[in-house]
Amino acid sequence: MTTPSESATALAIDVRGLRKSYGDKVAVESLDMQVVAGTVVGFLGPNGAGKTTVIRILSTLLAPDRGTFAVASVSSSNPVEIRRRIGVLPESAGYPPAQTSEEWLCYHAQLFGASRTAARETALRLLAEVGLADRSRSRIANLSRGMRQRLGIARALVNDPSVVFLDEPTLGLDPRGQQQVLDLVARIAGEHSVTVVLSTHTLAEVEQVCSRVMILNRGRLVADGTVAEVVRSAAAPRSGVLVVPAELRQRAIAVLAAQRIPATAASRPDEIGLTLPVDATIEQSSTAALNTLLAADVPVLGLAFEGGRLSDAFLAVTEGANDD
Amino acid sequence: MTDMTVRSTPAVSPALVVAGRELRDLWLSARGLALMLVYTAVLSITTYLVASNQELNFLEQREAVGLIVQTAVAVGALLVVLGAADSLSGERERGSLESLLLTPSPRGAVIVGKGAAALSLWLVAYALAIPYIWWLGRDVDTFGVAAVSGFVVGSLLALFLTGVGLLISAFSRSNAASLSVSFLVLLALYVPHQMPAEAMRGWVGELLLRLDPFTSGLLFLDRLIVHEHTAGQEIGLLVAPIVAAIALPAAAVVAAGRLTLLGRGRS
């Protein structure tokens, strides 16, 4: 077995056997995760799944009970060096209302070692990058929530990090604000060539900007891969719609049911809704349905399939998550 | 990467950066000025009362000077301990501590910077007290002794109480708890000074007087200003304030390594 430090050259994040508990409650259990540099990862999970705990451990704010990790090729035994190389937008980050955007960014840039002049240059560049150039002298108290989140993202970039953790960056934002933040995430991932870990509950965001998805449930990684891979591996239900002559619809449903192909009447009189078996491909399922109907002399006028959705996969792999 | 990134040696000491930010936040906002307004109000009322008592011959002029210096030191100490107690737990409660802890700056430097801002409350407060001390002591040639001894004792107690406030703040989950506990600690330290002289006789009373930095510091002021003793005669009373002024801030810096959010990850 390789150690994190041995295999970390191409990995932005390498976690082995991580465990963290709060008293009797286990927040993270035997977590292994590897993220290749340059990836935008959607970090998903229901409330209490352990996402924030994992982010806080990886950003060295919390010590794990067990396990090792490396972030940006730096071992967990060197937390100060890890902090130099990461940027974090914490969940529910607080901002000093009396400071201006520029002052706040300058302050943090200086805490990362920049001179006053370099800190100011960095602050102005980042404010322009997140669309707040004209608000550099505005007190943070006068910024909208969306602007503050963008300011928080600028703060996360103040040290030019190689790994960025964004914990619920779109929480509480209106759709326009959410879109601005997502565009920003996609842009910084591209322009800064950073690895981004995006923790969110909004699955559409993940499908929009993430090249990889990790789903955490009760402290364990239960799904990991591209959106398509996760949907497939999670055996998320898929559906299809068959179009048949309206007068033959009931017969078609009966014929399909006889072959154990779940079919129901759809809203339009000539449509039949199909629920595809999770263990079969779309090709297998469509062939079976078509053959059954053609054998029964029911003409098929149309056929469309809907691939599994990430939300379905999420629900499938986190089933019962909020039961306790 | 830009030239400012991933530097192992910061361009400016993180303690200075934090101190500069904290000082601006304290003095350019209404907070510091409001505290000084309250402080000068307390001093003005105390000065008026002791001055009118002098006219009625209830107080010797030296006693009046001693009283105003002790008041300046005691209220200044209160401001310092509350300022220090708010520094970390306040940030924790406002959600801004996490961003600070995510920087590579040593935790000890953060503590030192915040402690410097709390100490500035004492320095400004004592500067405001000087005219009052001068006014009351102008006829008895005691201004110099009173001003210098008040500054020395007050500074030692301010250092001590900064350490106390920072320690309590570092490990308090809520700001209200931090402020309450710090205030109670200050009250407890003040108790021996307020006890009747009879109660403080004997070796237990003497030990308590000398072990409590607050009481022994105020007693030192009383002996120098009112009883005209020399500093050399009463230097023993400064041992506890000196030890406390070194030990508590040092303990706060050491404990800074254990500074955390004190909360659990939420999702």
Image (tube, coloured by chain):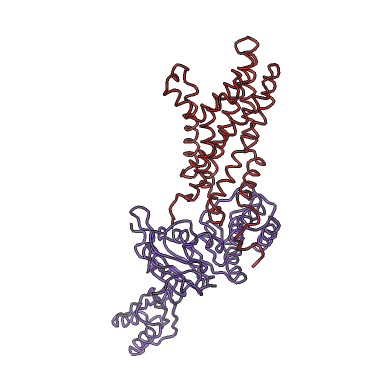
Chain colours: A purple, B red
| Quadrant the C terminus of chain A occupies | bottom left
Q: Give how far across and how far down residue B125 sits, in percent.
A: 64, 32
Q: Give how far across and how far down residue B207 sits, in percent.
A: 44, 26
Which residue appears at 67% of the width and 57% of the height?
Answer: A115
Q: Which residue lies furthest to the left in this view?
A: A258
The residue nearer to you, when weighing A177 against A51, is: A51
Q: In this view, does A131 lie to the left or right of B237?
A: right
Q: Give how far across and how far down residue A316 sits, in percent.
A: 37, 69
On screen, residue A282 above or below B88? below
> Could you say which quadrant of the image residue B200 lies in?
top left
On screen, residue B227 above or below A279? above
The residue nearer to you, when weighing B213 against A305, is: B213
| Quadrant the N terminus of chain A occupies | bottom left
On screen, residue B238 above or below A176? above
Q: How many numbered dots are placed on residues in this image?
A: 0
Q: Residue furthest top?
A: B56
Q: Is residue A1 left or right of residue A182?
A: left
